[in-house]
């Protein structure tokens, strides 16, 4: 079957058919896929019944893979796989009051993966192993077009300021004061510009991550909050967002350098949702 790439009727994304995602993919197909990711920022690969090893092998073609800081959510089969799942590897649904279940509610907050690292993610590749019959959609935001449409006063601010990204801030949002009793990660705190130039295309994108940004550099957390909320509300308007309703064995790869995403709610006490993510390390955000 020839490789087919069809743009989605959405603010970002294209559907890719005609290849199986594995480490020995046809080199010509891989070059086409690389370019399609640059062009569309998100790629949907339907019907990918692949193993964790094959997922890791394909993802590794894009660069070095990250190991997620949450040990409890790593796969025991492939440590590069982060289990975004309400089900443990023995097949049991987590209690909604458990740490693991509550931790995953952080995915419902808009974010871009690994922004708390000195070298954030280039992209992520997520496979739907099990999906609930309702809910659990993923929303993706085009941060190129959001930046280009920003009101003048917000564009002037993001072009000249950095923000503090912290892994521990995620836990604070999810667990509140209880988060201070968990292990703190001082090395996973970084300042990044609030806009970045794409290292390949040169196109400017807004670079924000609501579940990791604690404050704008030069402003207090209290001063930062209303400004950040105004930016987030603007950037996540429907005109910039693609909503994906998952089918089992869908795989989506997205470019974290120009997108952010969030997960829709679902009945996690009743329905199983098992998503397996590999994350490709990228480069330091730079605004030129």
Image: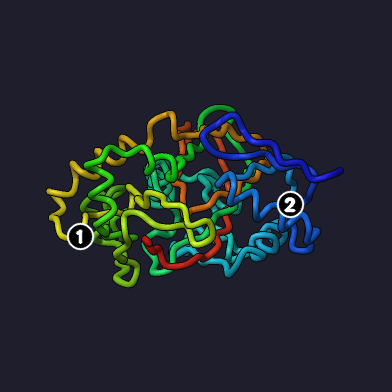
Q: How is the image coloured?
A: rainbow
Q: Is residue 173 above or below residue 191?
A: above
> Which residue occupies the foreground of this view, 179 or 41?
41
Residue 98 seen by the camera = no
SS class of the residue under badge 2? loop
Q: Quadrant of the N terminus?
A: top right
Residue depicted at 47% across the width and 32% down the height: 266
- Give whichever of discs 1 and 2 has the lower sequence position: 2
Using the rendered view, name the quadrant where residue 48 is placed: top right
Q: Given contact means CB atoms under 8 Å apart, are the residues at marks 1 and 2 in contact?
A: no
Q: Is residue 56 above or below residue 141?
A: below
| Label 2 Cα crowd, 10 Å radius (few <14 / some 14-19 / many 20+) | some
SS class of the residue under badge 1? loop
> Which residue occupies the foreground of this view, 8 or 77?
8
Residue 171's spot in the image, x, y percent?
31, 54
Residue 161's spot in the image, x, y percent?
24, 57
Residue under label 1: 217
Mark 1 vs mark 2, foreground winner is: 1
Q: Give me the disc on residue 266.
A: none
Residue depicted at 32% across the width and 39% down the height: 150
> Which residue occupies the foreground of this view, 130 or 96?
130
Using the rendered view, name the quadrant where residue 54 is placed: bottom right
Q: Is residue 178 above or below residue 137?
A: below
On screen, residue 4 versus residue 154, left or right, reads: right
Residue 207's spot in the image, x, y percent?
37, 52
On screen, residue 153 versus residue 30, left or right, reads: left
Residue under label 2: 50
Residue depicted at 25% across the width and 56% down the height: 160
């Amino acid at each position: 079957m020839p490789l087919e790439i069809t743009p989605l009727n959405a603010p970002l994304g294209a559907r890719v058919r005609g290849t199986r995602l594995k480490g020995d993919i046809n080199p010509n197909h891989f070059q086409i896929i690389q370019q399609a990711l640059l062009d569309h920022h998100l790629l949907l690969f339907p019907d990918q019944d692949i193993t964790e090893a094959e997922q890791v092998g394909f993802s590794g073609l894009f660069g070095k893979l990250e190991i997620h800081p949450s040990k409890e959510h790593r796969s025991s089969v492939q440590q590069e796989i982060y289990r975004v799942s309400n089900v443990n590897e023995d097949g049991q649904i987590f209690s909604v009051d458990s740490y693991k279940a509550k931790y995953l509610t952080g995915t419902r907050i808009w974010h871009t993966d690994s922004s708390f690292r000195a070298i954030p993610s280039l992209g992520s590749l997520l496979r739907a192993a099990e999906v609930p019959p309702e809910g659990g959609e993923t929303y993706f935001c085009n941060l190129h077009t959001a930046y280009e449409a920003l009101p003048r006063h917000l564009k002037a601010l993001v072009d000249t300021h950095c923000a503090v990204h912290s892994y521990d801030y995620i836990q604070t949002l999810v667990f509140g004061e209880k988060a201070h009793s968990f292990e703190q990660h001082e090395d996973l705190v970084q300042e990044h510009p609030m806009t970045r130039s794409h290292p390949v295309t040169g196109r400017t994108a807004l670079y924000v991550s609501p579940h990791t940004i604690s404050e704008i550099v030069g402003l207090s957390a209290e001063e930062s909050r209303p400004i950040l909320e105004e930016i987030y509300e603007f950037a996540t308007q429907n005109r910039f967002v693609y909503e994906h309703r998952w089918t089992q064995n869908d795989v989506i790869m997205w470019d974290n350098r120009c997108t952010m995403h969030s997960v829709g709610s679902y009945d996690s006490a009743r329905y199983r949702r098992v998503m397996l993510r590999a994350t490709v390390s990228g480069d330091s955000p730079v605004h030129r």
